[in-house]
Amino acid sequence: MALSHPKEAVLDSDYWTAENYNVKWVWSNLSSTSKIKVSDLNAVSSMKFFLLTDLWGSLLLGYRYFRASYRLYGITGWQQWEYDGPIVYFDTLQNVNICDYRLSYHLPYLGSRLEIGENIVGEFFWTPWARTNDEINLLLRYKKGMANIKGKGWGGSIKGVLEIKKFSGGQKILTGGGYELVRVNTKGTQEQNFYGDDPGTPDENETGVCFFNIPDEIKLKQQSFNIFVSYTF
């Protein structure tokens, strides 16, 4: 599953190994519109030290929590149930909530900061202890998937700060902007279970059926730009 352009579209592609052909082929390629809620919390402690004139460094110890919740609507795309078979196209349920998906990242990290004067700040962090919670609820099929997987990650940022006004009491109004890149790669296994009967297979009752040890790999590449105005006292 991938967030794509336009930003409100989520793509979901599935592949399978075709019997008697020994090849993998994409049998399902679907997209849905999404509503997204994002939370990002970063707590950090630092130890600052002097390097050169107008140049300071810091060692960082921190913990970052990032969570993205997606509510998906509609199905557009195609599926091919048999290798070299007919392709069936979909464009339906555009106002129906078909799936809820949530990713949360727990990132304890080590890092460093470099400050050039009072105007430029660069940071880098590395985490060998990244953990991702992966949860999906396929509402039309009464099926949930859950995983708690581990891996590594790194990131970096740079920002510039400009002083707009300094008051006689020492207070300041500052403005600036910055760029951040975060990469996280986690691997593990997922558990899936049916909490009801899948209406897509009326000849079977899947209620209570579980699947274990399904390979799960999640790669995060997040880029962000920001501008800010702050008041210090």
Image: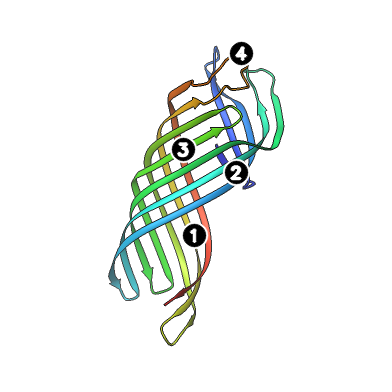
Q: Quadrant of residue 83?
A: top right
In primary-sequence order, the first of circles 3 and 4 is: 3
Dot 4: few (<14), some (14–19), or many (≥20) neighbours within 10 Å?
A: few
User: Which of the two marks, 3 or 1, is nearer to us in this view?
Assistant: 3
Q: Is residue 55 above or below residue 208?
A: below
Q: Residue at x 55, y 24 (%)?
A: 196
Q: Residue at x 49, y 21 (%)?
A: 208
Dot 3: few (<14), some (14–19), or many (≥20) neighbours within 10 Å?
A: some
> Viewed as shown, does residue 202 lie left or right of 54?
right
Answer yes or no: do the residues labelled 2 and 4 have beta carbons within 8 Å? no
Instruction: Tell which residue pokes out farthest to the top in this image.
Output: 20
Instruction: Report the residue marked by disc 3.
Output: 134
Classify mark 2: helix, strand or loop: strand
In primary-sequence order, the first of circles 1 and 2 is: 2
Q: Which mark is residue 141?
A: none
Instruction: Report the residue marked by disc 1.
Output: 179
Residue sitting nearer the eye, 117 or 199: 199
Q: Quadrant location of the N terminus?
A: top right
